Amino acid sequence: MSIRNPKQALYDQFATVAKALGNPQRLELIEHLAQGPRSVDALASKLSLPIANVSQHLQAMRRAGLVASERDGKFINYRLADDSVLTAFAAIRAVAVRHSAEVERVVNGWFNRKDDMEPVSREELASRMKADLVTVIDVRPGDEFALGHLPGAINLPMSEIDRWLPELQSDREIVAYCRGPWCVLSFEAVAELRKRGFKARRLEDGMPEWKAAGMTVEHVQAGRIDT
Amino acid sequence: MSIRNPKQALYDQFATVAKALGNPQRLELIEHLAQGPRSVDALASKLSLPIANVSQHLQAMRRAGLVASERDGKFINYRLADDSVLTAFAAIRAVAVRHSAEVERVVNGWFNRKDDMEPVSREELASRMKADLVTVIDVRPGDEFALGHLPGAINLPMSEIDRWLPELQSDREIVAYCRGPWCVLSFEAVAELRKRGFKARRLEDGMPEWKAAGMTVEHVQAGRIDT
DNA sequence: TTTATATTCAATAATTACATTGAATGTACG
DNA sequence: CGTACATTCAATGTAATTATTGAATATAAA
């Protein structure tokens, strides 16, 4: 606690931030918070973790300045402190992707070969959407879809893919997206759709990046979402 | 070690990278490696740490893909794996700066008031250099200066500031820079220079950022550096 | 006021990170 | 070959991180 030289004090601060990012569960929490503010309870059930555990992780992140929280009735809603947190997350992902054979292996091994998974860029998708050439599906759970999604996207959670698949036109290209560039849902969706003969691709990243790029987002006002 | 679901495997990889960044000594090592490749021994003496300690930190960073190394005779030179590492470091600094009252406090409390320290941007400095309006001093140690510095900069290590000060024109603005935006040397230099009546400012960041921005860098070919 | 619900706190145990020491390896050089 | 030097390895103790459990707070609703 005693103050040493200023150089060390600075590195300590920087290290504190990196340390707060250095845990898989906390990174997953950040990915969820990037969709929008969430209560401790909501996050805990999304990640299937004990509430106390999630609470402690959130507090650790708050101490490091990654998230902030406000009380709303008996809930406490956490949110990302600012966009610099997402930038940092993206930078760390970039390092991991560049280095790690492991990341490649996971993506390639679990789903398909990489070249089959060539993602669609934001710009490309936007222009094909305008020309009405693609069906865009949002494979996140209904509650996340409700809080904001790409204009014209259809919510098609992975859990209900069987129920909705017959309604999709099989001759039209499908682009799937979810929470972020490495959210597995869209990988799984594309794999599943291709297995059933659809022409499907992934958006290169997800909802938070789309929003951060200043592109329009559609909301659901009332409830009426088929969960 | 057993492979769980792909989602967790990815977050684990990302967390590994962040964890490798989550230590003040390792961050300092990165800042030094950003100046250029270094041997374990050189780094250890720069940081005044035991060699075995530095060696282990470097190995930890190598495992996470932050650095790489090549053997050169009986030395092993470590270097940053690629530019994405510096980007990640910068992103983490940005989070810390935005959040942390602590960072502000350190910088303000230790040196001067913040507004006195208004940094010069790269672009501004480049244009004033071209117009020959400023004296640029590089306050890093001589060996780092030798391996690359801003064109026309004078090497004026902190340890020798007394010896060289009389040679500086006191009516000309001085811009000091060092290893990076939070390298304390340039803060100290500016404080010292002002105390002695010079008009001094800091470059907003340091050597690696200048180089990364594609601006010209000058080298010293033979030895002949006044250490 | 009581009850239910959301969150935090406190205490514990298991694991991992870190610094330190001295020995081991690998390379250069006489 | 043997010595010097740079680096790594292995072993140790200490500290920090993490998950888990159950108790404690705080708010809302009955």
Image: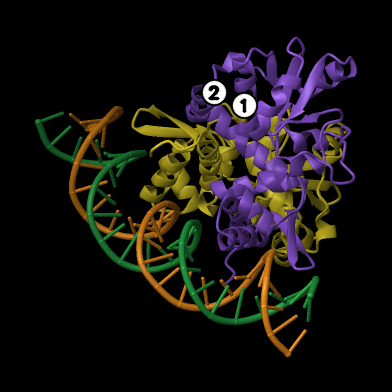
Chain colours: A yellow, B purple, C green, D orange
Total marks drawn? 2
Q: Residue at x 83, y 13 (%)?
A: B133
Q: Quadrant of residue B205?
A: top right
**In the image, B159: left or right of B103?**
right
Q: Residue at x 59, y 16 (%)?
A: B195
- x, y percent for residue C18: 49, 56
Instruction: Say which mark, if any, is on residue B111.
Output: 2
Tag 2, which chain? B
The answer to whether marks 1 and 2 mark residues whose Cβ atoms lie closer than 8 Å is: yes
Closer to the camera, A103 or A192? A103
- x, y percent for residue A176: 73, 47
Spatial CA span between label 1 and label 2:
7 Å
- x, y percent for residue A225: 57, 37
Q: Residue at x 41, y 43 (%)?
A: A41
Q: Amino acid at mark 1?
A: Phe
Q: Amino acid at mark 2?
A: Phe
Q: Quadrant of residue B211?
A: top right
**In the image, A128: left or right of A210?**
right
Q: Badge 2: how crowded within 10 Å, few (<14), some, or many (20+)?
A: some
Tag 2 secondary structure: loop
**In the image, A141: left or right of B102?**
right
Closer to the camera, A177 or B197? B197
Name the N-terminal-most of marks 1 and 2.
2
Q: Badge 1: how crowded within 10 Å, few (<14), some, or many (20+)?
A: many
Residue marked by disc 1: B187
- x, y percent for residue D12: 40, 73
Q: Is residue A104 above or below residue A35?
A: below
- Can the viewer see residue B52 in this picture? yes
Q: Quadrant of the N terminus of chain A?
A: top left
Q: Quadrant of residue B63?
A: bottom right
